[in-house]
Image (cartoon, helix red, strand yellow):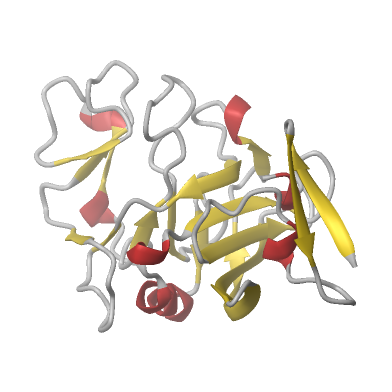
Amino acid sequence: MRTALVTGSLIVSALLPQGPSPLPARLADTGGGSQLITAVAPAPGSTTGRVTWWDRRAGRWYEAGSAEARFGANGLTDGARRVQGTNTTPAGLYALPYAFGNRRAPAGTEYRYRRVTPGSWWCQDNASGSYNRWTEPLPADCAPGEAEHLADYGTQYAHALVIAFNYERPVRGRGAGIFLHVNGRGATAGCVSVPDRAMRALLRWADPRRSPHIAIGTASGALAVTRY
């Protein structure tokens, strides 16, 4: 069965096998690499869902692993319109620049991995030149109350991947510090989280040479992951 995926004025045709096709094959964009993570919630207001990681081999997508996921306490929202401090997870397709953690990288990790130290901060101060960046030490123009001290989150940031939301050219007030990390006690402040075992498996699986991205969205509707 031949189908067309449309994104803006670009139409991409793909020959898909009979029956349900894997989720990445139904996305308008997967980032151009041969690895993809999908983080899918049932509805915009959901705080739980599922993360699945995929490999593309010989033109086909194959599931490599899956785990239950948690999202922002106020669900998901369009990443292009997100407002900082709303406890929402930004829907969209994002690169994964590097990994970090309070613990050592799991054996087999190939991603650039930055170890958290007592001086590691993530600046979320809209007035700072370091907005939405790792800083070490905390710069004078980033107020401590507007920054996240990474060492304080030994459980959540045991291992993590930076999600490049609002990262390349940050828009002030849109949000900072969105990661894929280990579960805490409940919903997140806007990140995507998974159990520790799944996070370690993801880091062993992710290959920066294959340009993995993460697609975040809902199963259907205006925030459907297939739109990205």
Rendered residue at 38%/35% (across/down): 167
Residue 156 sits above or below residue 138 on the image: below
Q: Is residue 19 left or right of residue 96?
A: right
The answer to which of 194 and 216 lies nearer the viewer is 216
- Rendering quarter of residue 44: top right
Q: Is residue 89 left or right of residue 226?
A: left
Q: Is residue 168 visible?
A: yes
Residue 14, image x, y percentages:
76, 60
Q: Quadrant of the N terminus?
A: bottom right
The answer to which of 206 and 198 lies nearer the viewer is 206
Rendered residue at 71%/57% (across/down): 41
The answer to which of 206 and 158 lies nearer the viewer is 206
Residue 34, image x, y percentages:
51, 66
Residue 40 sits above or below residue 129 on the image: below
Q: Is residue 49 left or right of residue 82?
A: right
Rendered residue at 44%/33% (across/down): 166
Q: Is residue 45 visible?
A: no
Residue 39, image x, y percentages:
62, 59
Residue 108 sits above or below residue 224 on the image: below
- Rendering quarter of residue 48: bottom right
Q: Quadrant of the C terminus?
A: top right
- Rendering quarter of residue 70: bottom right
Residue 216, image x, y percentages:
62, 51
Residue 192 sits above or below residue 52 on the image: above
